[in-house]
Amino acid sequence: MNNVLRDNLMKKGFMLVCDGSNGAGKTTVIKTIEQYLKNKGLDVIVTREPGGTPIGEKIREIILDPTTPEMCNLTELMLFGAGRAQHINEKILPALAAGKVVISDRFDAATFSFQHYARGIDLDTICKINDMALNGFSPDMNIILDLDPKVGLERVMQRGEGLDRMEDEKMEFLERARNGYLTQAKQNPSKFTVIDASQTQAEVADEVISAIDRLIENHSTC
């Protein structure tokens, strides 16, 4: 697909990402967004990273497997990039071309937060891998659910499902990842909306809906 055709097709649909701290309530927020958009008569697809496609889900298993702590940082980064390239080409771009709304549980902002700010991989390497995967694509909005990592970890532990390889990192790692999200939001306020996830579910939902309304209004005028 050439760039001109891709850009024209992308105007028919739009993509938003729900991201942020572990345990911040992404699943609940995504369900709220999905129902809100469906009530407006929009065709919605919910997906996730890592994952989203059959290949991506296999990559997800490898990345999050808690029994592989020896995975090196560059391997992790390249696996995320590989999964994202497949995700975009197999699922996201076709959905946008069909005029659908794509909601993704995490996307490339997570790579910068976890692999650059938390892992310490240099920004140039991150950008090279991510740029190859994106091939010029960018989501329309990133909703960042911000939460103290200690509170988030307590919520995750309460699920009783055990921790995956990323969740089982040291608290300092999770704090650096959180700061990575906040830094990205400050650098690009037009594409990022930060919401305090320590609020009640109703308060979070109200702020999310307001952000979605702004996105729809801006998209409709483009």
Image (cartoon, helix red, strand yellow):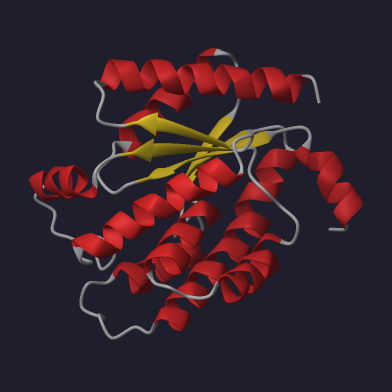
Q: Is residue 45 left or right of residue 75?
A: right
Asked if residue 35 can be seen in this view, the reply is no
Establish if 58 lies above or below 52.
below
At x 47% / y 81%, what residue is drawn? 74
Image location (x, y in percent) of residue 40: 57, 13
Q: Residue furthest right?
A: 4
Report which quarter residue 197 is drawn in: top left
Q: Quarter of the image for the C terminus: give it.
A: top right
* Front residue of this view, candidates 188 and 100: 188
At x 79% / y 35%, what residue is drawn? 11
Q: Quarter of the image for the N terminus: give it.
A: bottom right
Asked if residue 34 can be seen in this view, the reply is yes
Q: Is residue 213 left or right of residue 93?
A: left
At x 51% / y 58%, what residue is drawn? 53
At x 25% / y 80%, what residue is drawn? 69
Image location (x, y in percent) of residue 140: 65, 38
Establish if 207 lies above or below 176.
above
In this rendering, the count of numbered labels is 0
* Front residue of this view, candidates 149 and 136: 149
Image location (x, y in percent) of residue 17: 51, 41
Establish if 9 lies above or below 4.
above
Image location (x, y in percent) of residue 207: 43, 19
* Front residue of this view, candidates 107 and 169: 169
